[in-house]
Image (cartoon, helix red, strand yellow):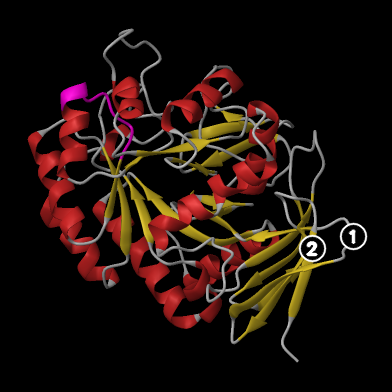
Amino acid sequence: MSPRVVGRDPQTGLGRAITIVDGRIAAIDSVDYAGPHYLSAGLVDLQINGYSRFDLNDGALTPERVLALTELMFSLGTTSYLPTLVTASEANITSGLVAIRDARARYPLVAKAVPCVHVEGPFISPNDGARGAHPAAHVRDADIAEFERWQAASDGLVGLLTLSPHSDEAIALVRHASTRGVHVSIGHTDATSTQIHAAAEAGAVLSTHLGNGAAALLPRHPNAIWAQLADDRLTATLIGDSHHLPADTLLVMLRAKGLDRALLVSDVAAPGGLEPGIYQQTIGGRVQLWANGRLGTPGTPYLAGAALPLADCVARTVGMTGFSLAQVLALATINPGRFVGDRGRLAIGERADLILFDWSDGYERLAISQTYVAGELVWAR
């Protein structure tokens, strides 16, 4: 008998059943269902730096650690994700890429969950503010040759590259990477509006955690945030954890871009999921995690990454914006899925990446009950 997953449609609240055959959705039917669980496509996160002490960026990444992190992601409702390697030496970035490559080769579940890798930096602004928590010592000029060395070492695993288009060399890399099928995202930048639009013309398609990785003081206009909001060629990735963007800012950004040109990311780092306290991490060094999920530099107003998974960001974004659960789920499933081979879709013939979860108005997280990847039950509460 073909597996059948039953839950509530987040848009209508009515029951629906999904029949799975050979790991794919074979049928979607309306059914009577009075249970508490919602049924959705699995979450797709384009930016994960680590979680629960599993750090992708400490220079000692192993395939086993990638597998452990992947299994944690399943428990949080994320069925596809991009391991994100940040600004570091070329040797550290390359070793991380090789470890993820080997994890995909060794573990079928990693291969299913990790379509490619996101490299965020090192070709970003060297200036304070725009650089964020990335280490200044390893920020460097855009280099096509280095990008090609990454791809050679990892069998072409880099699928998303975040850079700052503040130089002619960076624009050239945008064009080069885009023609090779890599999605280029603008981030950690103090580029001019002209340079932002030139990057989009050269092939950039995303803005990395728009509104963050920017100087605390900006010209009223023009500036890099306005330029990215205005350019319809750029889809905005946004951290909806209630710490990185105030509710008003998040709402205005979503209205400006439209719900079809925006998506949620977690940008979660190694202290995520841990008890409140002081931690040492690769991104930002000595950091403090508060009970409300804020991760920052102790004694300052500055953030140092994120600590809440995408399921929490979905719930908090509903609360901050007033958009419906179904609308916000699209920002964490269909929309990011477009950048990783059209994952995150509930349609006949699509891969059966599914989650069952509980949620009510006012909840700050989706309580995941079951997670399916390619039709296989990989986690159950």
Specify the quadrant that holds the N terminus: bottom right
Residue lying furthest bottom: 1
Image: 345 above or below 133: below
Residue at point 54%, 74% (across, down): 351
- What's the CA distance linking mark 1 and mark 2? 7 Å
Q: Is residue 272 visible?
A: no
Which residue, given by chain and number where applicable, does mark 1 sit on?
35
- Inspect the image, locate mark 1, and give the three-letter code of the amino acid beneath it: Gly
Residue 295: x percent and y percent? 59, 32
Residue lying furthest right: 34
Residue 62: x percent and y percent? 47, 68
Residue at point 38%, 59% (across, down): 117
Specify the quadrant that holds the C terminus: bottom right
Q: Classify residue 107 as left or right of residue 324.
A: left
**Dominant secondary structure of the residues highlighted in magenta in the image:** loop
Q: Report the magenta residues as a range.
A: 186-194
Lower position in the chain sequence, tag 1 or tag 2 = 2
Residue at point 44%, 52% (across, down): 58
Which residue, given by chain and number where applicable, does mark 2 sit on?
7
Q: Quadrant of residue 354?
A: bottom right
Residue 179: x percent and y percent? 16, 58
Secondary element type, mark 2 = strand
Mark identifier at residue 68: none
Secondary element type, mark 1 = loop
Q: Is residue 53 visible?
A: yes
Q: Quadrant of residue 4?
A: bottom right
Between residues 107 and 339, which one lies in front from this camera angle? 339
Between residues 175 and 293, which one lies in front from this camera angle? 175
Residue contact between numbered discs 1 and 2, judged by CB atoms under 8 Å: yes
Residue 193: x percent and y percent? 21, 22
